[in-house]
Amino acid sequence: MHLHDLTIKKFHEGLEKKEFSAFDVTKTFFEYIETRDKEVGAYLSIHKDEAYKQAELVDLKVAKNESVSWLAGVPMAIKDNLLITGLPATAASKMLENYKAAYDATVISKLKSEGAVFLGKTNMDEFAMGSSTENSAFQKTRNPHDLDRVPGGSSGGSAAAVAGHMAVAALGSDTGGSIRQPASFCGVVGLKPTYGAVSRHGVIAMASSLDQIGPITKTVEDAAILFKTISGQDKFDSTSAVPPAGGKYGEELWNPKLEDIKKLKIGIPKEYFGPGLDPVVVKAMEEVMESLKSLGLEFKEISLPHTQYALSCYYIIMPAEVSSNLARLDGVRYSPVNGVSRGDHDLAELYKKNRSHGFGAEAKRRIILGTYVLSSGYYDAYYAKAQKVRQLIKDDFDKAFQEVDVIFTPVAPTPAFKFGEKMSDPLAMYLSDIFTIPVNMAGLPAVSIPAKIKLGHAEGQAGLPIGFQLIGKHWREADILGIGQFYEKLSG
């Protein structure tokens, strides 16, 4: 058994054929993590006892010849802003350094019922604020393809765990590209579902109208399997919903038909292929388009004219929601902050000390900005106006989808950059999400898929992975996942 080859599908087939046990695979993963993660730093915590117990339960079912689900025994990594009962949920912040979850997130409950094995919690930018995982309060995560470069963010730990073969699959969260951008940098598949398709109950909220939980996997097929499992309406999340047609996602997610995929027309937004795009990314996109055309897919140029306002609009709405969501974190209700003594201060002073010591620089920056745009006298000038622009961005997509079925774009302007390269310039860091943010503003589904040309990955700087993005209509994950699966078959 080679960990490098294991996908969800291959693991399931091997388990059913009794080629290996879930326990042995779990043990092998932990042994590999102990070696490999010393240099990558994908995990904030690992949880052997819980993982072995779950693996043994799966092995008992297999021994009794009982049927097991696709995800039974699959070793998974979970981003540290998702709650698992009794385990740490720090969101990579000193503010929650001592917090352990009191309940399971809905996605975790669903995975537990399927028998998935959770190896541990993965590193991230603090409260999912960042595009490089450099904003974690605890450690750096390095890109498994080049240890001098970032894995992307904020789900950098989850993407690095999968790319570094320290998990078969992982969960991340995506507010402005935090699943797709690290997936692109690390050469794995990352799906941001339609807003509302997956319950947000049990995720430590960053910006509630933008956050979505989604899978990070080695193949598009695996992403489809995992997405199907975690999707669905949830009584604990009033923003969750079901697809309008039929009320649920079907087998077409992971078993697409080529005759249906060939009928899809792909739009190329001219605003996404302008100045600022790295030449190696342009080359990779051209080669992917040629591959997709060989499948019989038709391309058409489209326009998304309000794209130029997406970034500035996002950085008004997102911090506003951040300042609101993080207001409840005071170092009293969830967990104490290390280094702050409760007995030495009155309540107001204790809050100040806790929040000053607990939050990192990027979190403070966004809280201050969000508080400002929501303040009296500035709400209409900034927040209300940004919401109007957000509607224009959504209208652009609606109009485009009258002409095409799927939209093709790069995921990021460049391959993975080096540590520290953009930390001193927050605006440059924010620009790395410029192609993914509009999708969250419109609530659409989108997937990042590695461009596989020549030697397996696009020959970008230092041979780094480069991802391409497929954006679908609301609730049409089947279209983008279907194209992606045939692209993978085509490119080997």
Image (cartoon, rainbow, N blue to C red):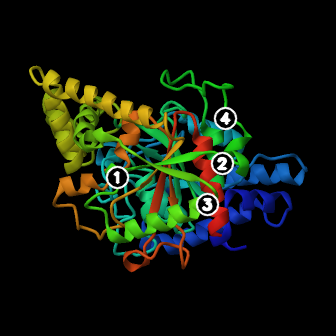
What SS does tag 4 mark? loop
Confirm or deny contact between disc 2 and disc 3 (CB under 8 A).
Answer: no
Name which residue type carries label 2: Ile
**Quarter of image, res 311:** top left
The extreme left residue here reads: 377
Q: Residue at x 16, y 61 (%)?
A: 424
Q: How many neighbours does mark 4 have within 10 angstroms: few (below 14), some (14-19), or many (20 or more)?
A: many
Quickly name the residue at label 4. 249
Using the image, tell me which numbered label, if any, was put on residue 272: 1
- 231 above or below 375? below
**Quarter of image, res 387:** top left
Quickly name the residue at label 3. 487
Whichever of callouts 2 and 4 sits on the residue coming sooner in the sequence is 4
Confirm or deny contact between disc 2 and disc 1 (CB under 8 A).
Answer: no
Q: Residue at x 47, y 72 (%)?
A: 458
Quickly name the residue at label 2. 261
Q: Position of residue 188 (x, y in %)?
A: 52, 61
Whichever of callouts 2 and 3 sits on the residue coming sooner in the sequence is 2
Using the image, tell me which numbered label, if any, was put on residue 66: none
Left or right: residue 44 compared with residue 350 = right
Q: Position of residue 481 (x, y in %)?
A: 60, 49
What SS does tag 1 mark? helix
Mark pair 2, 3: CA separation: 11 Å
- 489 above or below 363? below
Q: How many neighbours does mark 1 have within 10 angstroms: few (below 14), some (14-19), or many (20 or more)?
A: many
Name which residue type carries label 4: Tyr
Q: Quadrant of the N terminus?
A: bottom right
Q: Position of residue 423 (x, y in %)?
A: 21, 61
Q: How many neighbours does mark 3 have within 10 angstroms: few (below 14), some (14-19), or many (20 or more)?
A: many
